[in-house]
Image (spheres, helix red, strand yellow):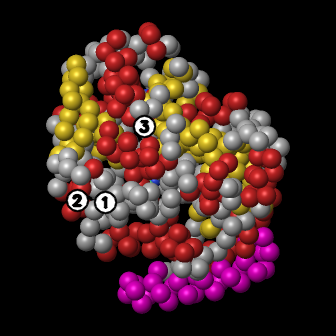
Amino acid sequence: MLKVKGVIGLQWGDEGKGKLVHLMSESFDVIARYNGGNNAGHTIVTNGSSFVFHLLPSGMMHSHILGIIGNGTVINPKVLLEEIDWLTQQGHQIQDRLFISKNSHLILPYHTFRDEWNENLRKQRIGTTKRGIGPAYTDKISRDGIRLGDTRDIYVFRQLLQQKLEEQKTMVQKLYGQDPLWDIPAIIEEYSQYAQTMAPFITDTAYLLNQAISQEKKVMLESAQGTMLDIDFGTYPYVTSCSSLVGGASTGLGIPPHYIQNTLGICKAYTTRVGEGPFPTEITSPEGQILLERGHEYGSTTGRPRRCGWLDIPALRYAIMLNGVEELAIMKLDVLDTLDEIRICTHYQPKDEANSEYPSSQHEFAQITPCYETIKGWKTETQNCRSFTSLPLIAQDYIRKIESYLERPVRFVSVGPDRKETIER
Ligand code: GDP
Ligand code: IMO
Ligand code: MG
């Protein structure tokens, strides 16, 4: 049996997963998303045009790929159908190529409403994408959600939706002291339309995927978000609401954990984060602005500027351990091309036994200081380099240094957004 390949973000998301999944998926048969929803934004740039996938697996532009969206995801039907429409307009056949789990959960208008309100009421905001992700997962866990499978019988769905909307309206009035002014009949009509259009895509994806694996199909798991945003192991509470580790793919798709092997960990040649929360290597000097502008570090989903910082080896070591990463992809090396000096955070101080654990609270983060090794910048353009040896020697050393700190081989080095701007070693 062929093993399933995991592709994981090792930082706070936006590492370049979309680019790499799209690139690698040429030699795969199935790409499966297993977590998150349209808080994700995975960018693909090919022949000068770019597209951001929020929900569909990033390999869907290849006509041979079967795309699976697993039970671990939360689905905004409007966004889903817009992506399907866009791909269809581009001449891609989607029917019989996209399968969405009947056990995935619907994001409804009251989820986005609550996301916005919860953020406004928090003394310390998380900086969510306000896409209703947290409230949709909250309802899932408290067993109040509506699943995609529930939309297949339109009569039952309309009744269920009516009941939920009325319950939620009462709850919003009690909790926030405000009438949400929802037009319940109009919402029911709108979502009934979505339900009918989505119906052909909804199925039991666990059977489908396990069958594909047993038939020796090559399967890739495309994570959304990044390890440091994981609900359990990320910088809680400044995290998302699901598991973004490779382990989440087992429960988010219904495949046995031992099927997953050869996980590729993706990170930028530096670090970024959108939203609030600890960020030990954040740059507050003007170099941060250089990375922001050269890297076009504006969120693919919300357009917010991303906070920028240096490469953080302790955080990456932690992420590699949690995911059993076997090989690495270093993205956006070209963004560092103009810097006089580049810093790598090699460890945090104090470095005693207790602190060898990765910090897990605001209090613990406040007590550590990142310690850096500084290297000279290479001050040469790398965007046109297509082999490792054509990179400036200092850039090669930078990659080798990362390999030695992380004790994992770097398989891909990315030097530009376009799929062709990639070096595979
Ligand atoms: P994802 O969420 O992990 O798929 O990443 P995003 O798509 O949100 O963000 C990555 C951004 O970096 C996108 O705008 C990509 O087009 C861009 N990108 C990816 N790789 C490179 C690279 O090597 N160099 C540069 N300059 N941009 C890149
Ligand atoms: P991709 O898949 C970067 C961040 C938000 C916020 C926190 C919680 O493109 O890498 P949420 O809306 O999930 O409740 O927000 O998580 N976040 C992301 N940051 N990339 C993502 O996805 C993200 N998905 C969520 O900015 O800080
Ligand atoms: Mg993104």
Disc nearest the viewer among 2 and 3 = 2
- Mark 1 touching mark 3, by CB under 8 A? no
Q: Which mark is residue 360?
A: 1
In the image, residue 298 sits, relative to residue 354, either above or below, namely above
Answer yes or no: disc 1 within 8 Å of ligand 2.
Answer: no
Residue 405 in the image, given as x and y percentages of width and height = 34, 32
Q: How many marks?
A: 3
Bounds of the magenta segment: 151-180
Visible residue check, residue 276:
no
How far apart marks 1 and 2 lie (CA) works out to 6 Å
Q: State the image quarter where residue 197 is shown.
A: bottom right
Amino acid type, residue under disc 2 in the picture? Glu
- Of residues 251 and 282, which is closer to you in this image? 251
| Mark 1 touches mark 2? (CB < 8 Å) | yes
The residue located at (24%, 40%) in the rendering is 347
- Residue 221 forms part of the magenta stretch: no
Q: Secondary structure at mark 2?
A: helix
Q: On the picture, is 420 further left or further right than 361?
A: right
The kind of residue on which mark 3 rests is Cys
N-term mark: 1 or 3: 3
Query: Residue 117 is drawn in which quadrant?
Result: bottom left
Residue at which label 3 appears? 267
Between 405 and 7, the one nearer to me in the picture:
405
Residue 74 place in picture, x, y as percent: 59, 63
Residue corresponding to mark 2? 364
Q: Name which of mark 2 and mark 3 comes first in the sequence.
A: 3
